[in-house]
Image (cartoon, grey):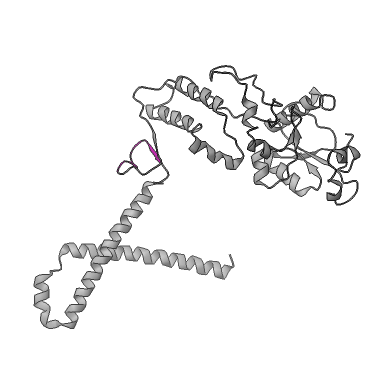
Amino acid sequence: REIKFWDDDRVLAMNPNLKKALPYDDYPITVSRRVHGSSSTASVTKYLHTACPSEWPSSLVGKAIDWPEGSKECEGSGGMTKCLKEIGGAIGYIDAGHGHSEGLKEIELQNVHGTYLSSRRAAEKGGIGAAAAAIPDSADADFGSVDLLNKEGEFTWPIVAMSYVYVRKDLSFMETPEQQSLLIAFLKNLYDPKAIEQCGIFGFTRVPNSVRKIALKGIDMIEVDSSAPEWVVEEDTIPGDGQGAYIISHKRRSYAEYQRYSQGSDLEKAMAKIAELEAKISGESAAPANTAAFASTAAYTDNDAQKLTAALALGAVSFTLWCIAGLAFIAKRMCGV
């Protein structure tokens, strides 16, 4: 390796403000790399060979290569993050989403157009999706030769990889028609803007509309049993049917939650009845002469007794749970947990 220090004249010529940011002269460059084979290694090494073939030969391209002596081994994305954070002067590679979420500093790369830019700026300019401009026009075509590295465009990011989902056209191997249509619903959600935009927090970028159209046509090629039900996503409340079959909803997370809600309503009614009975009993104690009248106008029935017993039982459960919570709190205080 020819360049071993960040203040090498060739580095400073391209980064004139770097010198004053270095803690001392001859600040070493530590090349961090993945230990085992990875798609990240394959993409980065292929880009380096494409951009600088004389400096990075084809023998150093692949998921796992024989790295030059002196490079730092880092296990997985987590290990790479640790290397870059803990080793001063380290340089390495990691997927953009992971790097941004970890607060790592990103260097700018030069694309085919000659533009220096970061992946974040490229994304803002539509330069991630731009790399996927030339792909097969049918979802059942051969995607084996698709290459999204170093594509044309002023703001195109030079290292782009696309995630694929491979699905059989005939789903008869699946156990039930419901499973078949559920898979179709999942696939369509991958191209629903409301659903897939959530992946942006992980650094993923939606495919351009041209790729989306190809994918949706591919989903229509899949053969599904004619009796398969349609799955519906509840975006706005569907009164009465929101908890029904084949409804996907974030509003109703579980049946147990529904039961707890129902029991809460029953408990409120029981407590109101108890308050009513207590008021009547208090009235009886204050005015014993009216006992006969009270008994004749508001008889205490077996049904009332059952409700009161249920309410008291629920109250006992609540008291027990509070005791348990209190003991746990005391234990934490005493044990210093």
- Percent coordinates x, y for residue 90 in the rendering: 79, 43
- The residue lying toward the viewer, choosing from 322 and 186, is 186
Image mark count = 0
* Residue shown at the point (47%, 30%) measured from the top left: 188
Percent position (x, y) of residue 192?
48, 33
- Queried whether the magenta region covers residue 246, the answer comes back as yes
Q: Nearer the viewer, residue 2 or 298?
A: 2
Left or right: 43, with 296 as reference point: right
Q: Examine the residues drawn in magenta and state their main secondary structure.
A: loop
Q: Reply above or below: 264 against 294.
A: above
Residue 112 is left or right of residue 307, and the answer is: right
Residue at image x 64%, y 35%?
A: 125
Is 156 displayed left or right of 27 in the figure?
Answer: left
Quadrant where the N terminus lies?
top right
From this viewpoint, is residue 313 visible? yes
Which residues make up the magenta segment?
240-248
Res 38 seen here: no
Residue 226 sits in quarter? top left
Q: Which x, y percent locates residue 47? A: 74, 28
- The part of the image, by quadrant, that contains residue 175 is top left
At which x and y percent is residue 254?
A: 39, 46
Image-quadrant location for residue 159: top right
Quadrant of the drawing holding the C terminus: bottom right
Is residue 266 on the magenta stretch?
no
